[in-house]
Image: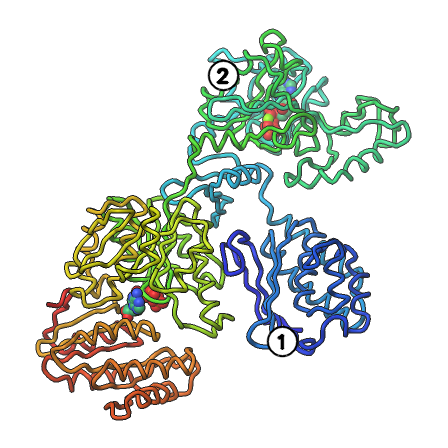
Amino acid sequence: MRILKIQTLRGPNYWSIRRHKLIVMRLDLENLAETPSNQIPGFYEGLVEALPSLEGHYCSPGCRGGFLMRVKEGTMMGHIVEHVALELQELAGMHVGFGRTRETATPGIFQVVIEYLNEEAGRYSARAAVRLCQSIVDRGRYPKAELDQDILDLQDLWRESSLGPSTEAIVKEAERRGIPWTQLSARFLIQLGYGVNQKRMQATMTGNTGILGVELACDKEATKRILAASGAPVPKGTVINFFDDLEEAIEYVGGYPIVIKPSDGNHGRGITIDIREWDEAEAAYEAARLISRSIIVERYYAGRDHRVLVVNGKVVAVAERVPAHVVGDGRSTIAQLIEETNQDPNRGEGHDNILTKIELDRSSYQLLERQGLTLKSVPPKGTICYLRATANLSTGGSAIDRTDEIHPENVWLAQRVVKIIGLDIAGLDIVTTDISRPLREVDGVIVEVNAAPGFRMHVAPSQGIPRNVAGAVMDMLFPHEQSGRIPILSVTGTNGKTTTTRLLAHIYKQTGKVIGYTTTDGTYIGEYLVESGDNTGPQSAHVILEDPTVEVAVLETARGGILRSGLGFDLANVGVVLNVSADHLGIGDIDTIEQLANLKSVVAEAVFPDGYAVLNADDHRVAAMAQKTKANIAYFTMNPDAELVRQHVQQGGVAAVYENGYLSIVKGDWTHRIERAENIPLTMGGRAGFMIANALAASLAAFVQDVTIEQIRAGLKTFRASVSQTPGRMNLFNLGKYHALVDYAHNPASYEALGSFVRNWTTGERIGVVGGPGDRRDEDFVTLGKLSAEIFDYIIVKEDDDTRGRLRGSAADLITNGITQVNPNCPYESVLDETTAINKALDMAPDNSLVVILPESVSRAIKLIKLRGLVTEEVQPQ
Ligand code: ATP
Ligand code: ATP
Ligand code: MG
Ligand code: MG
């Protein structure tokens, strides 16, 4: 077996609209191409031995053991690799269930599709599955040691990629609310929502968290001073910078027991509490000094440690934090008990699990000593031995939910204190013997206020009710169930995508909104180009969706991007499909027009149920997409009598129709005329029928988004197919005696569309300069030749500079072959070099003629025309 290609999909795609995270592996079975599993001696047994848990895969028989049954009876290796890859991820703790395997048009080459949770782990599992199956084929087994290593590697990849527990809680809640999120490329920033409605977070800090509040909270001494000044209970204490001042400071706070901590530490680093004598104080000072220059000396308050979480001015959760400890069983030593406690699968390293493993430090030994214990002691059954003085989860502590127990006065106090510090999300550390009584009654204190508090202890307490604190954050950032989204209008089709996308963006601009749009020419925001280039894939979509100035996204969505990595968004508000015709067939395992239609249908299907699929009723493959999408349907048609559309509008549906020279919106009984086609420059005086179709699609897409008819009309009338706005799309130049048209048509359907316009050129001769990209199929070139013979009076056949792997002259031969098939007398010549061909055509052009150029390089063609002297660009021919 040989892996030919591995692709990672991240959005709605050809294989699934709902499952965005898929790996597509192109796999050559080589010598196994004609050998189903039952014909490979020992394969079934070897597979069951290596991965007995495959028993759990139902597969097509629909029952336990179903898949293994198929292996026994004989199934192809691609299918087995799929199941193995899924199972490997499953064994590493990643729950994935979706897979597909299809043979491509090339016998023996398969596409194996598997779901993933983590991209790298997904790709790893695909490669490991091939390795595993190949090993069983070759040697009858896959060594246990290798499998174990694979699983460890997969677990590592999974762990490394996982977000912290707080961020995890936030993005889960966002997903639950349908708020899209993305991880930005730096500083662990998370973007929630899109465009102008987005919010940002970094751990539990939001874009609204004020820098003053954060800095104040991080300065423990300043916090205490501000709080003390406002009458809130804080530990009596002072700050020192020199060891010599320690003694005096201890006296100032009222003597032992005391606490020494760095003034700007966190996670309990460098803190010693309950210090009872000078030696301890000295050591504590040194420990704190490693973290910070300024040292806080405070009175020690006996009591339990609580974390009160305040979000948007409200207490949303309270947890009691219990320091790391073990409970005696009467048999084991403390060392053994620690070992055992750390076996808990909930305990991980650092912050990446619900709890953290217990690790001992200097204070632990001191604490044990005070309890009269060592690591070798065997504590009696049921006794609690503390191993850490502070209760931070990150030092192995655990948490008990106390949200329902906190006294209302303490709630009031906590909320007031957070307001004073000035934070939208804050965690108060409160030491008190009883959180259900007012602090002032029991001598409780607020030890500090934390910016960016962890959520772990609230969403997954070791005891008590988990609290959805991320929900409170979402309520704050996205009140009234806002989704944080902006309208997304996605446009696909074989021809006319760029034109329609630009026109739609232009129409939408009439609403005064900032439109971000992507096309084959580049990415734009408002009036400006962000980036030039072919920007019709998911990455360009992200540029728009991540931009905080964009209010509406209009995205040209080409097949290449969908195939390579899926859509760049989950669901659109409007999905426009213009047409489907033969183009690019044979590339990327899309070999038939039906497959191409299925691919483009992704744009119609990945639409919200209350959004619209805008479909071309005149193209049966596009019209049929109505059956596949859950969205509302809106049709556009050039045929006012189209039965499908008539029925649709009668049932209350909406459509855009070209009728009696008008572009109109039709719904139920009424017809609202937008504008006469001849008044819309893009349609070239109403002569370019396909442009009318594009304009109908754009108008309809805008209309279903509540853009008014007046705004649509204004947009249609002011959009010009000029070189600057739509280079290479029907750019017509007046050279005085004759005209030249530059167009980027490069497949049979677009030639045909162009032909309908050229045929309307009745004033003089029609000369064509034709050719196409070398990576198209032979028959496509022949078709182009045939169509050219029907359209033009004289043809110059040329080739692209870049033949895309084709032999020089072969494309031209195929085209001339097509020409002579239709009209053996058609005058033509082959001039392979594009520049020479264009110049030749311009030189020979008689008066009143039209030279139609279908260039490889639009800019070069336009330059050659402009070299001819006085040229005016015509945007609306008479
Ligand atoms: P974290 O990052 O977890 O909030 P930290 O490093 O910021 O910890 P503090 O919150 O100041 O440190 O102290 C850690 C813990 O030590 C407190 O939650 C509390 O249990 C205990 N502690 C700190 N100061 C006192 C004090 N004056 N009296 C009693 N206990 C205290
Ligand atoms: P690409 O795949 O290169 O991005 P596209 O789909 O974006 O193409 P446009 O750039 O808008 O299409 O148009 C390219 C050419 O296709 C036009 O110049 C015209 O010749 C032709 N064309 C445009 N609209 C249609 C249509 N609705 N039907 C058929 N052909 C069309
Ligand atoms: Mg703290
Ligand atoms: Mg395009």
Query: CA separation, marks 2 and 1?
Result: 74 Å
x then y, percent, for residue 64: 75, 53
Left or right of 395 in this view: 164: left
Residue type, label 2: Leu
x then y, percent, for residue 418: 48, 21
Q: Is tag 2's residue or tag 1's residue first in the polypeptide sequence?
A: 1
x then y, percent, for residue 386: 76, 25
Q: Secondary structure at mark 2?
A: helix
- At 82% from the left and 65% from the top, the residue drawn is 45
Front position among marks 2 and 1: 1
> If the picture is divided into quarters, which one holds ligand 1?
top right
Residue at the outermost right position:
331
- At 65% from the left and 16% from the top, the residue drawn is 300
The tag on residue 227 is 2
Would residue 533 be seen by someone viewing this image from the given angle?
no
Q: Which residue is mark 1?
A: 108
- At 80% from the left and 72% from the top, the residue drawn is 139
